[in-house]
Image (cartoon, rainbow, N blue to C red):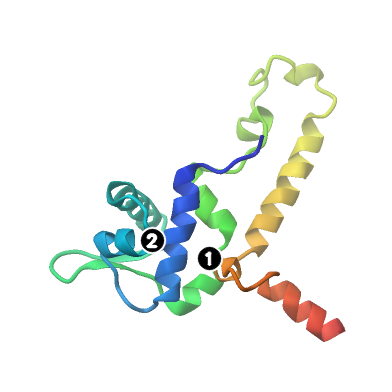
Amino acid sequence: MLKLSRLTDYAVVALFRLWQDAPEQKTATQLAMETGLPEPTLVKILKTLARAGLVSSRRGSGGGYYLGKEKGRVISVKQIIEAMEGPIALTTCIETPVKNACAISAACPVQTRWTVVNSAICDVLDQVMLADMHPVQAVPAAEAEKAVAHG
């Protein structure tokens, strides 16, 4: 089953909250109170997101985490997943395209097709932006614009 980790799910929640309140800066404690996420877990997530360049941080007194309002429109769900979990790879042969990475890799008739499937999933995830995760928005902004233009 394809399933994102709880940390990745929480990362989307935290980023979305930062985006909603942008450009306001929040501490991990504030974010934990506002989202209901456990603070120690949130600290770990925010550090990971900061290392990936998806969220900015300020240290010291008055420090915290923040996200520019426009950044929510350019951060894709794919970027969040990869920041939290690493490269998206549905099968071992995609993750490690080395001969003998899988017991049947030399004779596998579908190995190259998994690359196509993986690419399609990555393309979709790369088109869904953080801003598109808004609960009142039923379809991604790009799709809504296309529908109106062709309407």
Tell me if I can see residue 54 in this picture: no
Residue 55 image position (x, y, % from top left):
39, 64
| Position above or below: 116 against 93 | below
Residue 141 image position (x, y, % from top left):
67, 75
Query: Residue at horizontal 17%, vertical 71%?
Result: 62
Residue projecting furthest to the left: 61
Q: Residues within 10 Å of mark 1 (few under 14, many from 20)?
A: some
Residue projecting furthest to the top: 103
Query: Residue at horizontal 36%, vertical 79%?
Result: 23
For residue 11, which quarter of the picture? bottom left
Tell me if I can see residue 76 in this picture: yes
Query: Residue at horizontal 37%, vertical 53%?
Result: 37
Earlier along the polypeptide chain: callout 1 or callout 2? Answer: 2
Q: Nearer the viewer, residue 117 or 61?
A: 61
| Position above or below: 131 against 43 | below
The residue where tag 1 is placed is 75
For residue 22, which quarter of the picture? bottom left
Residue 50 image position (x, y, % from top left):
36, 58
For residue 94, which quarter of the picture? top right
| Position above or below: 30 against 20 | above
Q: Amino acid at mark 2?
A: Thr
> Which is closer to the viewer, label 1 or label 2?
2
Q: Nearer the viewer, residue 143 or 56?
A: 143
Q: Nearer the viewer, residue 64 or 28?
A: 28
Using residue 143 as the reference point, say whether residue 11 is left or right of it.
left
Query: Residue at horizontal 33%, vertical 47%?
Result: 41
Using residue 142 as the reference point, say whether residue 82 is left or right of it.
left
Q: Secondary structure at mark 2?
A: helix
Residue 35, disc: 2
| Position above or below: 97 against 115 | above
